[in-house]
Image: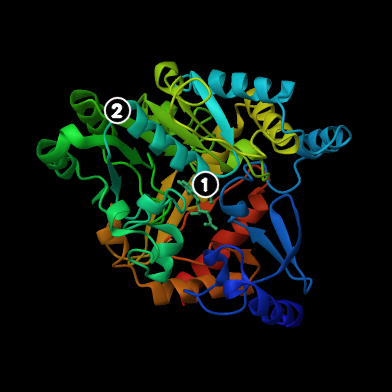
């Protein structure tokens, strides 16, 4: 596979950008090799600067539920660009998007648009503390909620990939406000609340974990979080940055029938443009400035181009609810057969092949995976034009643009590796 331009660009990039990338997990550090510099995407495929093409299962880490360059999003962007790029003032589209999100995710009675999932979770956490007057947060090992100082404790995604237990630069006092517990352990949550319930502002959870690889909630786990937070006057925050509009139109809260107090959204809400949101019960959201004392702001929040893309995505998904059944069928087909030694977890169209013979239900079981073998799998598939996340601890994503042929080809390549 010719890689000379990616190699040249990677060398240049490393001279000016830490690791040569603008987000660590893109650097291929845990799988080795040269990150592919991408020239363009189309449908289910991406094309690198050396002319190689790949069936893309990263999908920009989740936003591209409709694949690359979906027509409705392109049309909306072209139209929005004619009017300008940013005003720093309210626009009609922001109202329309807030109304649409609230319609699709009814627990979000009110919401605020921000620019990234990190901003959304950081703001939701600040709001939970401001609303409850409490300081402590429960999060789960292996879950990643963006690079929020107090949440970079036993986090997943790039931190798990790079083996960074707790990042430098976060004051001990911040980290100590976070109680990190095993995912899917109701007993651990009960104990934390029994010991410090009166000081816990919120539990933040990925209702389907995607940042230690895909790990579904154990039966009863989410229900227990709902009961315990209500019982102890803490807020339940569903971080649906990845699962929102992914595992169901209404996200994991619709799929599992749990109503959180606050929800964070990102990725799909912007169709590939930078936009995210946090929102929930109106009585809580009314604490946000300028109504209340919890401050949060953003120069480009509600950016007209990002909002236009998001509106186009959501309107398409609302008009085509059948996409979720299609994604379910295709993803089930793709993950149906794995050999002994490989465990696959899947919820809807997000999934992970874990190189472990045992069930993967939390970070402790995920980290036992044979990451070297995953690296071999990753490169075997990459050489054959299948682009998976360059980390054992990430989820893969299917889009509506992935064809039956894409799926068949991918299955054949994976089976060839599994039998090698
Ligand atoms: P951003 O700040 O990256 O937009 O969102 C942070 C975030 C928050 N919550 C969840 C559940 C997330 O998955 C993320 C970001 N996900 C990672 C991929 N696992 C982003 C990829 C990257 O860091 O480059």
* Residue at image location 67% in from the left, 25% down from the top: 94
Give yes or no for contact between labels 2 and 1 (Cβ–Cβ under 8 Å).
no
Q: CA distance from mark 2 to mark 1?
A: 41 Å
* Residue at image location 47% in from the left, 66% down from the top: 391
* Residue at image location 52% in from the left, 46% down from the top: 331
* Residue 24 visible to an observer of this rendering: yes
Q: Please give the residue where the numbered disc 2 appears in the rendered image.
A: 132
The tag earlier along the polypeptide, 2 or 1, is 2
Image x and y of residue 106, in percent: 48, 19
* Residue at image location 67% in from the left, 48% down from the top: 403
User: Dividing the picture into quarters, in which one does residue 257 lie?
Assistant: top left
Task: Tell us which disc is closer to us: 2 or 1.
Answer: 2
Tell me how the rendering is colored: rainbow
- Left or right: residue 338 compared with residue 319: left
Which label sits on residue 331? Answer: 1
Quadrant housing the N terminus: bottom right
Ligand 1 contact, mark 1 (Cβ < 8 Å): no
């Amino acid at each position: 596979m010719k890689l000379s331009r990616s190699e040249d660009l990677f060398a240049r990039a490393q001279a000016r950008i830490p690791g040569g990338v603008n987000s660590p997990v893109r650097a291929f550090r845990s799988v080795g090799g040269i990150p592919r510099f991408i020239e363009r995407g189309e449908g289910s495929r991406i094309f690198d600067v050396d002319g190689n093409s790949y069936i893309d299962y990263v999908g920009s880490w989740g936003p591209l539920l409709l694949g690359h360059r979906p027509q409705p999003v392109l049309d909306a962007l072209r139209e929005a660009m004619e009017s300008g790029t940013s005003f720093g003032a309210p626009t009609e589209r922001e109202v329309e998007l807030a109304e649409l999100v609230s319609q699709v995710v009814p627990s979000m009675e009110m919401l605020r648009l921000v620019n990234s999932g990190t901003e959304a979770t950081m703001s939701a956490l600040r709001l939970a503390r401001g609303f409850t007057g409490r300081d402590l947060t429960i999060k789960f090992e292996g879950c990643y909620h963006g690079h929020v100082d107090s949440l970079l404790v036993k986090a997943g995604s790039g931190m798990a990939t790079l083996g960074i237990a707790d990042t430098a630069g976060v004051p001990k006092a911040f980290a100590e406000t976070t109680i990190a517990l095993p995912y899917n352990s109701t007993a651990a949550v009960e104990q934390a609340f029994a010991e410090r319930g009166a000081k816990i502002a919120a539990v933040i959870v990925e209702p389907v974990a995607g940042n230690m690889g895909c790990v579904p909630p154990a039966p009863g786990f989410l229900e227990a979080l709902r009961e315990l937070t209500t019982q102890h006057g803490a807020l339940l925050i569903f971080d649906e940055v990845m699962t929102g509009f992914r595992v169901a139109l209404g996200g994991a809260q619709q799929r599992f029938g749990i109503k959180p107090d606050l929800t964070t959204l990102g990725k799909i809400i912007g169709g590939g443009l930078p936009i995210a949101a946090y929102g929930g019960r109106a009585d809580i959201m009314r604490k946000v400035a300028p109504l209340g004392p919890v401050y949060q702001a953003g120069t480009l929040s509600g950016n007209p181009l990002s909002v236009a893309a998001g509106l186009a995505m959501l309107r398409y998904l609302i008009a085509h609810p059948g996409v979720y059944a299609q994604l379910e069928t295709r993803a089930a087909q793709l993950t149906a057969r794995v050999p002994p030694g490989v465990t696959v977890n899947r919820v809807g169209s997000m999934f992970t092949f874990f190189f472990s013979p045992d069930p993967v239900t939390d970070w402790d079981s995920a980290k036992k995976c044979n990451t070297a073998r995953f690296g071999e799998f990753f490169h075997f598939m990459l050489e054959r034009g299948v682009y998976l996340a360059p980390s054992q601890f990430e989820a893969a994503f299917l889009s509506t643009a992935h064809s039956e042929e894409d799926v068949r080809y991918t299955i054949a390549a994976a089976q060839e590796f599994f039998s090698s």
